[in-house]
Amino acid sequence: MSRSNDELKGYRGLSRSKLTEWGIRVWSDVQVLNDAGSMFEGVVLPRSETLDDLHIVIKMRNGYNIGIHVDRVRSIKEVGYKEAVYKIPEKDFPRSPELPNVTLLGTGGTIASRLDYRTGAVIPAFTPGELYGAVPELADICNLQTKKLFGVFSENMASREYIILAKTIGDEIATGVDGIVIGHGTDTMGHTAAILNFMVQNSPVPIVVVGSQRSSDRPSSDAALNLIHAVRAAAFGNIAEVQICMFGPTSDRYGLLHRGTRCRKMHSSYRSAFRTIGDIPLCIVNRDSFTYLTEDYLPRDSQRQVVTDPLYDDRATILYYYPGMSPDLVDALVEKGYRGIVIAGTGLGHVNKPLYPALERAIKLGVHVVMTVQTLWGYAQMYVYDTGRDLLDIGVVPLDNMLPETALMKLCWVLGHTDEHDEVLRLMRHPVNHEITEREPHNGYLILQGGLPETEEFTKSHWK
Ligand code: ASP
């Protein structure tokens, strides 16, 4: 059987000639038998530009993709042909007067993505309207209005985007919405949730940042459920803060709402990647209930006047200390005009002695230097060792249990207001929303170290 170039589009070199030899096209529905006698059924996908030309990629009936080396194909047969259509139609969201009004602001990330089979990469491609097309249950929860602000992966979020986002949130709240959801990449979701806590204060309604670890074309995607939980939290939840909503456990049993100043992505691929650090989460959310885990939050109050304060000066950075760090790094930052340095120090907040003179020089030149801890849990307590005391004497200011990224976001926000040293430090040490807490709860820090008898016993009784 001969095939046109178009039909073979996406395959080159060896695999392409193999496809011709096998009488197979891209988008053929095939049955493949490999040299181990296993049978695979599915659709031949266009090969990504980055994949080698020795494999064919098949999307199997269960939704997973597999690559099969051409030399391992014993037989392959076309049983059908169906070109896939990946575009999900934009649907107008139905409105019912009795449901709350929620605005979904799209910024990009995996939650707004599908797989691009040309590059083999996940690209931001869904608009919020398409997201509704993919998750129609949202219409049972609220009247959803969608606005696509950006279409970026979250490493590209920065001052410009934070400012636009904060202003848009203010404008949306002014229209009287009952809640706001922000679709966002997970990688820097913690940064955005933190900065929004400073830029948007005193909100009358919930502001819920949500993402997904797996794109919606994967069977294990967390996109739909996270979105449903987030929209519920925005429509009916009682927490009027900037919060993060993501999978709680690795299963889809429930989502968690985390305080935006205390939350961090702690796993690169698990769906349960987000954890509240230094505290417990705010709330458990599922399809029909909210279980609040604390009473210490700002409750919804439609009379409250939001304060948007979208100022940001990005001349601040994090210095993640490592043994042997050279003082020229500090000098270089000062020379380049950085006004603030957040140190992520070892243990209780330490750096090596050779750094002291450089830090002292920086502080004398008016650079604001603050200390956080790499351990993430616990407090910078620089009075415990004499080395810590020396740093305090130089003028390095401890930020107690503020997370390093939250400290950076806050420092950029504070620097947007003032460069006056005492005022910068006063604002940094004065919590806006629990970025510094007086104590960390006894049940907050919990690491289930597998392999230990007590952990094995516990997980056995809880693992389903
Ligand atoms: N790289 C993506 C992002 O942060 C990951 C994700 O969305 O989960 O935009």
Image (cartoon, rainbow, N blue to C red):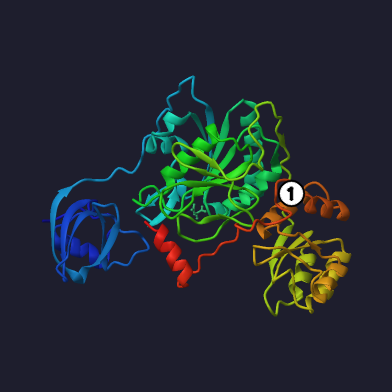
Q: What residue type is labelled 1?
A: Trp
Please determine whether, in this image, residue 262 is positioned above or below residue 12: above
The reply to whether residue 450 is in sight is no
315 left or right, relative to 171? right
Residue at image position (43%, 66%) is: 457
Quarter residue 341 falls in: bottom right
Q: Name the residue under label 1.
A: 413
Residue 295, above or below 191: above
Quarter that holds the C terminus: bottom left
**In this rendering, does residue 394 appear at all?**
yes
> Of helix, strand and loop, which one carries label 1?
helix
Residue 165 lies in quadrant: top right
Image location (x, y in percent) of residue 143: 48, 27
Is residue 96 depicted above or below 366 in this figure? above
Taking the view exactly as shown, the residue that stands out farthest to the top is: 97
Residue at image location 58% in from the left, 49% down from the top: 281
Q: Residue 305 at x, y = what percent? A: 71, 30
Q: Which residue is drawn at 66% across and 43% down?
A: 296
